[in-house]
C-alpha cells in the first residue's frame, strides 16, 4: 500500500472537525514591544516537568519573534474574548493594545480575564513541516475569574451553552 497524497484543503477541513480552544500567545518583539498571535495548537506534554507545546507557522510575520522568544505566555481565551482572537490572528495586527495585557511575573505579557495564562520559558523548538513546534516549560500560572472557553469548530467560533 502506498501513501496517498492528501490535499491541504482536505486535511484542513478534516482537522476542523476537531473542536479546539482558542489561545493568544504573547511575548515581546525584538524592539521590546508586546505582541500576540492567535493559536489553537496548545497541548499538554508533561506534568513533571510542566511542559506545554504549541506551533507557529514558518511564514508567519512573527515567526522569528516566537522562534527566538525566551519567555512568552499562553492565554486560554474565554467566550467573551472572540474579538481578541480575531484581532491578533491577522497579519500586521499583532501589537498588543495596552488595555489587552498586563505584565506577568516572568515579564511576558499576560491577557486579563483569560481563563488561564501559562507563563513559559522556551525549552525546545522542533521542525514540524510548515510549522515549528515550540515546547515551553510552565514557570507560572495565572488563573482568571472563570467563565466558559472560546471554542473553534468547523471554521467557526463556538461557545458552550
Image (cartoon, helix red, strand yellow):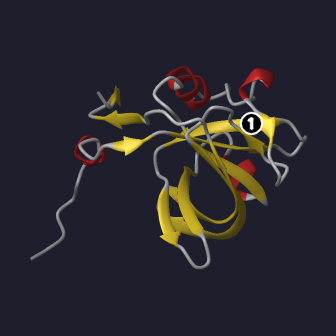
Q: Specify few, some or many for label 1: CA neighbours under 10 Å numbering under 14, 14-19, or 20 or more.
A: many
Q: Position of residue 2 (x, y in %)?
A: 14, 74
For mark 1, give the secondary structure: strand
User: Front-most of 20 and 91?
Assistant: 20
Q: Is residue 83 above or below residue 133?
A: above
The image quadrant of residue 59 is: top right
The residue shown at (89%, 41%) is 32
The residue shown at (46%, 45%) is 40
Q: Position of residue 139 (x, y in %)?
A: 72, 64
Position of the C terminus by quadrant:
top left
The image quadrant of residue 52 is: bottom right
Q: Which residue is mark 1?
A: 35
Q: Is residue 54 left or right of residue 148?
A: right
Residue reaching furthest to the right: 31
Q: Position of residue 80 (x, y in %)?
A: 50, 23
Q: Position of residue 116 (x, y in %)?
A: 59, 45
Position of the N terminus by quadrant:
bottom left
The residue shown at (68%, 42%) is 62
Amino acid at each position: 500500500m502506498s501513501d496517498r497524497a492528501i490535499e491541504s484543503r482536505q486535511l484542513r477541513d478534516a482537522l476542523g472537525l476537531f473542536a479546539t480552544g482558542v489561545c493568544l500567545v504573547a511575548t515581546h518583539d525584538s524592539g521590546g514591544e508586546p505582541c500576540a498571535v492567535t493559536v489553537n495548537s496548545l497541548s499538554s506534554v508533561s506534568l513533571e516537568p510542566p511542559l506545554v507545546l504549541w506551533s507557529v507557522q514558518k511564514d508567519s510575520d512573527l515567526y522569528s519573534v516566537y522562534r527566538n522568544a525566551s519567555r512568552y505566555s499562553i492565554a486560554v481565551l474565554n467566550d467573551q474574548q472572540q474579538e481578541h482572537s480575531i484581532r491578533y490572528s491577522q497579519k500586521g495586527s499583532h501589537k498588543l493594545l495596552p488595555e489587552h495585557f498586563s505584565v506577568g511575573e516572568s515579564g511576558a505579557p499576560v491577557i486579563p480575564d483569560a481563563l488561564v495564562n501559562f507563563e513559559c520559558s522556551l525549552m525546545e523548538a522542533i521542525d514540524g513541516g510548515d510549522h515549528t513546534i515550540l515546547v515551553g516549560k510552565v514557570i507560572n500560572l495565572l488563573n482568571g475569574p472563570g467563565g466558559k472557553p472560546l471554542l473553534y469548530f468547523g471554521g467557526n467560533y463556538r461557545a458552550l451553552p
